[in-house]
Amino acid sequence: MTMSAGSAGWYLRRLSRMGPQEVGGRVGDAVRRRRWRSAPPDCPSVTGARFTAVLPAGTIAAIPPDAAKRLVAEADRLMAGHVEYFGVVREDLADPDWWYDPKTGRRAPWGYAFDVPYRNEDAVGDVKQIWELSRHQYLTVLAAAYAITGDGRYAERVAEHLRSWWAANAPLRGVHWTSGIELGIRLLSWVWIRRLLDGWPGAAGLFEGNPVALNQIWHHQRWLAAFPSRGSSANNHVIAEAAGQYAAACAFGWFPSSARWAADALRSLERHLRGNTFGSGLNRELATEYHGLVLELGLAAVAEADAAGRPVPASIRLVLLRKTDALAAVVDNRLRPPRQGDADDGHGLVVDGTGTDRWASLLATGDAVFGRLDWWPAVTGTDVRTPLLAALIKPAGLSVTRPARRPAHFADAGLTILRGPAEKIWCRCDGGPHGFLSIAAHAHADALSVEVRHDGVDVLADPGTYCYHGQPEWRQYFRSTLGHNTLRLDGRDQSVSGGPFLWTRHARSRVLFAETADASGGGTARWCAEHHGYQPSVHRRRVELTAASQELRVVDEVRGPRRAVHLAFHLGPAIAADLVANRAVLTWTRDGEDRSAVLDLPGQLSWQAHRGETDPPLGWYSAGFGRKEPATTLVGTGFTDGPARAREFTTVLRFRG
């Protein structure tokens, strides 16, 4: 199936995943875009605007010194013109070209925003590279450095870049006016820039006293009010749109429509936070980084509401509480969450320097806002964002029963965590839905996959995401069935792709049982699930983790006609493998200590190690968006036995020491 977006076939496939209400909304959007081309809306005049959503006294003094030091070091790198986005280093940050993609060397075309073919890398460049700088999250870092140090150089650089961006990106012109998530996150950045620059003499003249800034802020909010993400696209994007719109309408409430925008955005935020989140607290996209993004955006929106003295539905705080408890439940002993589904390194609010752990920061904020439970993992790191948000978010007594013990099985999400002794062995088992909404945009074809770590080191790894646009063969590989620790039949994915963010047929999975309590206490934890993505065949997988022997057993059973089998196990980049026949000896180092394991693979299959192959891609690991490195993948090939009896393939991983 083609992976290209924008072709006639793609539009037909995309249309097939929409309901009548969504189609009607998109028709209205198209009519509005045509009307705005010749008659764009005008910003009303504003007089007497004042910014009052300032930080409480003493907030900056509460920032831990080591977190402040990391932040200022990051700001100094930015001041020197250095930044890295998605594996590409930029040295032009002192005077950036807002439309330039340093990866391909292309510049996005000028013109009416809705004419820009932003999905076409040949015409625009890598749009993620172009958009990232214009989220202005590096400017929130510079503004925070000013707030901490009082050094006016940081504030002046922020002002210089904002004026440059506003001059180069007139409303509705160019690539930065094509995607609502970009506008929403940019508005949130502007709110925090204004807040963090409040002690600088030029702050009011840069924002509320600046007609250009007022015009930009109004047009951003008018755009978001007119073109919300709809229906099958209402995933994390709509959360970012609503959070940015709400933050701006509260903090920059200077326009006749501000009260209406705030009310509409809050309703949207409440509805979609609930809709995007399982009752267990996990994100319905089943993409862990988007769990973090949505949690960050929700906390930032609540902070704006409390700063403005506006009431927030208790349901919003409750969803954020559940998301925080769920995050605390699924991380490993090094506070790393699962690597599930798409990940594009997106953040809601950035005010920290390199070396600050994102997930520890979110748990620290959760502790400050909601209070930690006894079973939460300890958080020893520090950050800047937590004291800033905690200074604005007011305590709220939520009438809710929180988990008395650490959850390990999330039935609604189909996610199960098995843990070994002292929690050093961590295993994620996937028996959940294939993503969220009809297109499951950020899902991977990874039904029944496992992810195994030892003391935080990826042993059986989820390879990651790597890219979205412009490299279809790599996008296809990293979201494929072969690209995960599961079983493939007849060379096909379990689910059918219709484009880089579109699945036209979803594999259906169900967990048959999950017994999670025994391994951490010295016994055996068990999990079993099956999926029907290869009808008429059924793939069933059983996983057992035995604490005493530090042994993980994976049994794959296939019922149905005789079919070709590929069983893949992806090793983390730190793992060296010596494969002889169907046994692989795995070695790695953790904190200067040599560690090892033995992986006994099913003898009915022929095994081969693959590493860094490109035609087709196989044997890769992506630590972050835009970055990939060779890693060993073990692939076994053979056949099922056919309808007479089910065939089992048993894999045993034994950790030594």
Image (tube, grey):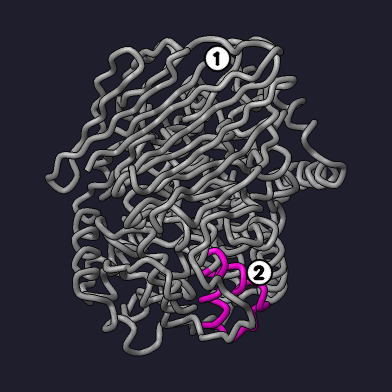
Three-letter amino acid code of the residue under disc 2 = Pro
Asked where in the image residue 592 lies, by quadrant, the reply is top left
Residue 73 appears in the picture as rendered: yes
- On screen, residue 393 above or below 316: below
Q: Secondary structure at mark 2?
A: loop
- Of circles 1 and 2, the one toward us is 1
Q: Which residue is mark 2?
A: 44
Q: Nearer the viewer, residue 164 or 232?
A: 232
Residue segment shown in magenta: 299-323
Does 317 appear in magenta? yes
- State the image coordinates of residue 554 (x, y, percent, origin top left): 48, 32
Three-letter amino acid code of the residue under disc 1 = Val
C-alpha distance separating marks 1 and 2: 64 Å
Residue at 54% of width from left, 24% of height from top? 487
Q: Nearer the viewer, residue 243 or 482?
A: 482
Q: Earlier in the sequence, mark 1 or mark 2?
A: 2
Mark 1 residue crowding within 10 angstroms, few (<14) / some (14–19) / many (20+): some
- State the image coordinates of residue 7 (x, y, percent, origin top left): 67, 21
Quadrant the N terminus occupies:
top right
- State the image coordinates of residue 241 (x, y, percent, origin top left): 61, 57
Asked where in the image residue 92 lies, by quadrant, the reply is top left
Quadrant the C terminus occupies:
top left
Q: Name the disc covering residue 565, or none.
A: 1
